[in-house]
Amino acid sequence: MKQSGIVQRLLGLVNSPLVNPAFMNLRNTCRPIDIGNLLHTPIADSRFVVIDTETTGFHAYGGDEIVSIAMLETRGLECTGTVYSQLINPQRAIPAESSAIHGLHDADVRDAPTIEEVLTEVLDFIGTAVIVGHHIDFDLRFINRTLKKRMGCRLHNPAIDTMLLFHGYSGRLGHYTLDDVAGACKVEITDRHSALGDARATCEVFCKLAGVGLRDNASVGELLKLQSANEF
């Protein structure tokens, strides 16, 4: 039986961003957070979420997609053990050169959810935390592109790049890989180029670097300034 025009319009309304709870949750999560209060919060009292993604390639706006995402929580500079890790179906073929890096192939992600299907889980995990990652702009480009496409919004959370923290720590500007920084911090990387393995190593690096050169009870704002400094 064909649905009447009224029924079709009602179904369309239920599935619209204005009514659907999942859409509303995404919209609410994308609302601006109280940045001023967050920046003045002591590091020890703050929540951080370390993020790493593996992708089909390097071009978030050129057709590449996420194939795996991992997130770890810290309270202050202590990893809590709370973890989110998920394979993602990119809905496109994974190039052989990318599989050679992260070890994921089409068959590994065929039955995995799409990034849109787990977006609410990802945003719920992040919440109002300060985001941390190594070359974090790369990961945020992929996440924010999906948010922009789906909901017309983006993450407003402050972000810390462990490579930039290392600039402050070492006094040396340059492009440093996670291997470079982890080696300097004496952090062992297990399962390199897996989202979870890299997130764990980045979490350890962050907790070590963020604790150097700051006064007791330093704020998140001071930590954000530290990542752009050339030396302590």
Image (tube, rainbow, N blue to C red):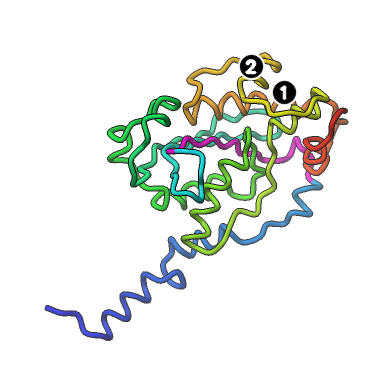
Q: Quadrant of the N terminus?
A: bottom left
Q: Position of residue 58 (x, y in %)?
A: 51, 39
Q: Position of residue 169 (x, y in %)?
A: 80, 25
Residue drawn at x 74%, y 39% is 45
Q: Left of 194 or right of it: where is 45?
A: right
Label 2's element? Answer: loop
Q: Position of residue 16 (x, y in %)?
A: 41, 71
Mark 2, residues whose alpha carbon is within 10 Å: few (<14), some, or many (≥20)? some
Q: Quadrant of the C terminus?
A: top right
Type of amino acid at the residue the image marks with label 2: Val
Location of mark 2 (residue): 187
Label 1's element? Answer: helix
Taking 211 as reference, is 61 above or below it? below
Q: Position of residue 230 (x, y in %)?
A: 84, 31
* Residue 182 numbered tag: none
Q: Residue 85's image quarter?
A: top left
Residue drawn at x 68%, y 36% is 161
Q: Is residue 53 magenta?
A: yes
Q: Left of 155 or right of it: where is 7?
A: left
Taking 17 as reference, is 119 above or below it? above
Q: Left of 123 or right of it: where is 89?
A: left
Region in magenta: 41-56
Location of mark 1 (residue): 208
Taking 147 as reference, is 211 above or below it? above
Type of amino acid at the residue the image marks with label 1: Lys
Mark 1, residues whose alpha carbon is within 10 Å: few (<14), some, or many (≥20)? some
Of the residues under marks 2 and 1, which one precedes in the sequence?
A: 2
Q: Is residue 72 magenta?
A: no
Q: Could you tell me if the residues under marks 2 and 1 are in contact, i.e. CB atoms within 8 Å?
A: yes
